[in-house]
Structures are given as structure tokens and as C-alpha cells.
Image: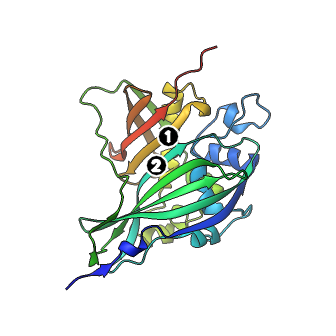
Amino acid sequence: MSGEDVSGLIGQSATIDSSYNRKDLITYAIGIGCDELRYVYENDGDFEAFPTYPFVLAFKGTEDDVVGFPSAAMQESNVMPGLPGSKFVLDGERQIEIIRPISAEGEKLKIKSTLVGIHQKGKGALVETTSEFIDEEGKVCVKLTNGTFVVGAKGFTPEKAGQTYSLAVPPPKRAPDAVCEMKTSPTQAHVYRLSGDYNPLHIDPMMAQMNGFKEPILHGLCSLGHAAHAVLKTYGGNEAARFRGMKCRFASPVLPGQTLVTEMWKEGNGRVIFLTKVKETNKVVISNAYVDLAPEAKL
């Protein structure tokens, strides 16, 4: 007996409005551990948006206040299908491509999210969506790709519908070319959530326990921001304008207060492959990852 046909779902999309200001950029930068004035002080001559900021815009939309979870923006932009057998979802993979840096002064952007792939994998399915950030001139400035693992999903056809951006990126078989340690704060998740992701899993002990954790965990996207910061500081002169893109896979959770160790391997064409671990446990938390950097500008 054939299962539910999901091929007709590929391509469905939704568009929402989003906006941000300088305060939002500063709050986000502090939330991912930045202390450089170019990211946290609006009067610094080099003030700019940290390049991974667009990840949080889909959470806040146009809201300036605390929002619920899921937020209205998340619900309005949701293109995730209801797959048979689904139990719960896990944040699997993320990718960002910077076509042009977002403005440091703040701006209004539309976010168009599209379902691009549904693939049976092991004990569930990998569902992939893309999000295009469109400025007021109608030009795409940023593109995100999200891979969500739907645990328990089965009984649908075809087993591979649409396309996939999932890619294995093993680190080279040599010692890292550079290593960067970043200590997170016990209140790191308290600060990071102010950028728009108010999931109580990251602050409410009872909610964390209901989800199988002994205590609240750090947002995966906060760990991503720390890793991006580590690579940009080490190989990109800490200049957001040199950040072209990033891809990563989440491997395990981080607890606020733990130390993130990012190991880096410099490859050709501006690519830096990296792996992020928790120092206290040696567990890998971000894998199959790279950052693409533009070359340093010549004066």
C-alpha cells in the first residue's frame, strides 16, 4: 500500500514582514558573546551587523516586545508539512549565504520561506526549507537554508522529494590550524532569548525537564553565533563584510556556562572548515561545518 504523497507540497511558500534596529543588532551581538565595539557600540566608527543576525529575524518578525513561542511570525511563515508518524522535531542543519550585508542602521525586510525538500532518513525525515530576505528594492540580500529532523515521520512517498542542501563536511585528517575557546556565561541564554527566540526550554527548568533535559540548554543558534564569531575573529579580521556564508549541523546541546572550543582548518578559496566542542565534556556540538570568507581588501 502506498503512503501519503508529499511531492505536491514541495514549493509551497509563505512571506512575512520583518524589521530590526541598532538596539536589536547590539542585543544579538552581546547574546553570542561579542565584546568588540564594532558590534556592541552604535557610535563606533566601524559599527556593523554581526553577519549571522538574520537567523533571529524569523522569530521576531516586526515585534519589538517579548513574543510568545511559537511567535506569530513563526506561525505565519511556517511551511513545515504535517508528516504521518511525526513525534517531535529537532533543529538539524543551518546554512546562510550573504549576498549583501544587512544595514547597520536597521531596515525592513520581507522573508519568503519555501519548502524545498522532504527526505526519509533513519528514524524520521529531514525537511528542508529556504528563506530569502528581500529588501525594499525587491532584491534578495540574504538566503537561509534550514534542515529540520522530524522524528518518527514515515509512511510517505516518495522517500526523496525535492532537493537537499545537506552535505557532509568532514574535517581534514590533520591537527587544526587554529583553535579558539569561548566561555559562555551562566546567563547566556537569558540574554540571547531577547533577540526573539523565547522558547521556554532555554530558561524554564520545568520546561527543560519536560523535554528530557536536567536543566535549560543554550539555544543552538547561540552556539552557532559563537562559532561564527570564533572563525571570523581568527581568519576574517573580525570584519563582517568578509563573511560570505556558513553551513553547520547541530550535534548535541550546550549548557550555559560551558566553554565552546572551535577547531579550524583553513582550506582554499577562503573556506574554513570547523568543528565546535564543549571543553568540559569533549562532546562535539557543531559538526559538518564551514565558513566562507572573502579575501582581505587591499588598500
Left or right of 168, for residue 64 = right
The answer to whether any part of residue 184 appears in the image is no
Classify 275 as above or below 166: above
- Read off the residue under disc 1: 245
Local crowd at mark 1 within 10 Å, few (<14), some, or many (≥20)? many
| Residue 48 position within the rendered picture, expressed as x and y whole percent measured from the top left | 69, 36
Look at mark 2 in the image and give the residue it sits on.
Answer: 95
Amino acid type for the residue under numbered disc 2 = Gln
Q: Earlier in the sequence, mark 2 or mark 1?
A: 2
User: What amino acid is labelled 1 in the image?
Assistant: Gly
| Rendering coords of residue 2 (x, y %) | 23, 82
Label 2 Cα crowd, 10 Å radius (few <14 / some 14-19 / many 20+): many
Q: Nearer the viewer, residue 185 or 193?
A: 193
x 57%, y 41%: residue: 99
Which quarter of the rendering shows the C terminus? top right
Question: Which disc, if any, is residue 193?
Answer: none
Q: Residue at x 57, y 55 (%)?
A: 132
**Seen in the image, is 69 located left or right of residue 257?**
right
| Residue 98: quadrant of the picture | top right
Using the image, determine if residue 194 lies above or below residue 243: below
- What kind of element bears circle 1? strand
Q: Locate residue 75 relative to residue 271 in the image: left or right.
A: right
Q: Are marks 2 and 1 in contact (CB under 8 Å)?
A: yes
Q: How is the image coloured?
A: rainbow
Task: Work out which residue is located at the far right of the displayed protein and give it.
Answer: 43
Residue 284 in the image, given as x and y percentages of width and height: 34, 45
Q: Quadrant of the N terminus?
A: bottom left
